[in-house]
């Protein structure tokens, strides 16, 4: 496996400290013309811990990841992948918020 980058190691470290199933945490890293995309996968029962109330934990992790990216002159984004069998229904406000208008 290729050497993990600082941003990927950072996300893995923080998320493993928050969840009950650290062995299920997986962070994939892809780079394209838009920057770096970290894709986070956790066990379904740990999704609530990663998202937090009203998404506050996820927003905080994303902010920290962007700061790590700025330190390394890279644009870094974090995508939290929905686990298999997970069901999340967005309301209209959440869907519009995701558009980042």
Image: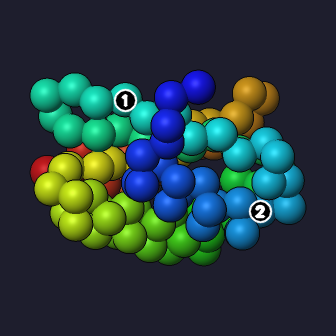
Q: Position of residue 99 (x, y in %)?
A: 24, 44
Q: Nearer the viewer, mark 2 or mark 1?
A: 1
**Residue in the picture at 49% in, 37% down:** 3
Q: Residues within 10 Å of mark 1 (few under 14, many from 20)?
A: few
Q: Is residue 65 left or right of residue 86?
A: left
> Residue 36, located in which quarter of the rendered image?
top left
Q: Position of residue 43 (x, y in %)?
A: 78, 44
> Residue 20, located in which quarter of the rendered image?
bottom right
**Residue in the picture at 78% in, 29% down:** 85
Q: Residues within 10 Å of mark 2 (few under 14, many from 20)?
A: some
The tag earlier along the polypeptide, 2 or 1, is 2
The residue beneath circle 1 is 30
| Helix, strand or loop under label 1 | strand
Circles 2 and 1: CB atoms closer than 8 Å: no
The residue beneath circle 2 is 19
Determine whether 72 is above or below 14 in the image: above
Residue nearer the viewer, 59 or 66: 66
**Residue in the picture at 79% in, 42% down:** 24
Please identify the quadrant where the N terminus is shown. Answer: top right
**Residue in the picture at 38% in, 70% down:** 64
| Helix, strand or loop under label 2 | loop
Determine whether 101 is above or below 51 in the image: above
Residue nearer the viewer, 81 or 39: 39
């Amino acid at each position: 496996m290729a050497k993990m980058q600082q941003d990927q190691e950072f996300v893995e470290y923080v998320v493993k400290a928050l969840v009950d199933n650290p062995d299920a945490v997986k962070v994939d890293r892809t780079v394209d013309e838009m920057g770096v995309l970290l894709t986070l996968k956790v066990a379904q029962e740990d999704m609530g811990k990663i998202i937090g109330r009203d998404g506050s934990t996820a927003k905080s992790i994303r902010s920290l990841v962007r700061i790590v990216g700025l330190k390394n002159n890279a644009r870094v984004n974090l995508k939290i992948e929905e686990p298999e069998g997970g069901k999340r229904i967005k309301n209209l406000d959440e869907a519009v918020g995701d558009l980042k208008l």
